[in-house]
Image (tube, grey):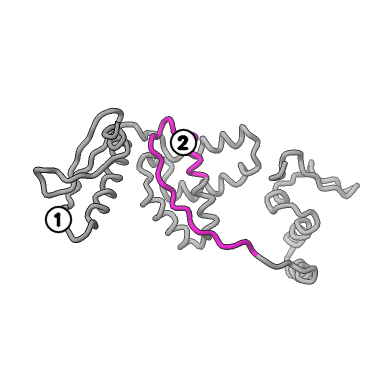
Amino acid sequence: MATKRSYSQGRVFKHPQSPYWYSAFSIRGEQVRKSTGLPYKAVGNFNERAAKQVLADHMARARAESGFGALTLDGLLKGVENDYKTNDLKSARVLTYRSKHLRDFFGANCRAGTITKDRLLAYAARRKEEGAGNASINREFSLLRRGFKLASDRVGTRPVFPMLREPAPRKGFFEPEDHAKVVAALPEPHDRIWQAIHDTGWRVVEILTRRKTHVDLENGWLNIEPGETKNR
């Protein structure tokens, strides 16, 4: 049992007839052994750690080539979108925005099996260069992780997601005089939008998605449909 488990998860070992670390793993029941090209006679265990990264690359490439990870990034994200729509979740409205960043970086046709922890770290670095905060990147990772979970029967092993440390919750209050100054400085119609957010306590996305059917100017009503709020 131990041998099967190690092959399933992948392992590196010292080949008795070679000075290099070897990787070993299984794809659809077939055992694969490949040299990592890294000598094991090195100071400390640095080359062993590097060999494990080569193992991860070997496994990702083999999954993609064998069809084990044939599902694309676009397929993963569409699975999440369908799941949210089916369950009438309000967060479905922000999926398009978050999905765009993932599709732009990895490519819509990127094989799910080739998305590794290293590529996720590169994605986080790119998003930081674009000005995204840790919380935004984590929400995008959560979206992709959800896609892997929904398609776990088709993509096999899921990558490890390097979730980033988020800042502590903000403290303090926005006083009435501060609010008045902001409204006075905003051009139309942004001043009215800000005022509506202040008066209702609704989230920005809830205000910006209102339609004519939600507005009753005669009676002074602005409506939100049951189930549209985060707390239902």
**Direction front: furthest residue:** 1
Residue 34 point in image, percent of width and height: 19, 41
Residue 79 point in image, percent of width and height: 51, 35
- Specify few, some or many for label 2: CA neighbours under 10 Å numbering under 14, 14-19, or 20 or more: some
Quarter of the image with the C terminus in it: top right
Residue 20 point in image, percent of width and height: 15, 49
Please tell me which residue lies in front, 8 or 114. Answer: 8
> For the residues marked 1 and 2, what is the alpha-carbon distance in whole angstroms?
43 Å
Q: Is residue 180 magenta?
A: no
Q: Residue at x 41, y 47 (%)?
A: 160
Secondary structure beneath label 2:
helix
Q: Give amino acid for label 1.
A: Lys
Q: What is the number of callouts on the image?
A: 2
Residue 38 point in image, percent of width and height: 18, 52
Instruction: Say which residue label 1 marks.
Output: 41
Mark earlier in primary sequence (1, 2): 1
Instruction: Say which residue label 2 marks.
Output: 75
Quarter of the image with the N terminus in it: top left
Q: Residue at x 73, y 51 (%)?
A: 207
Mark nearest the camera among 1 and 2 is 1
Residue 3's image quarter? top left
> Over which residues does the magenta segment extend?
143-170
Q: Is residue 148 magenta?
A: yes
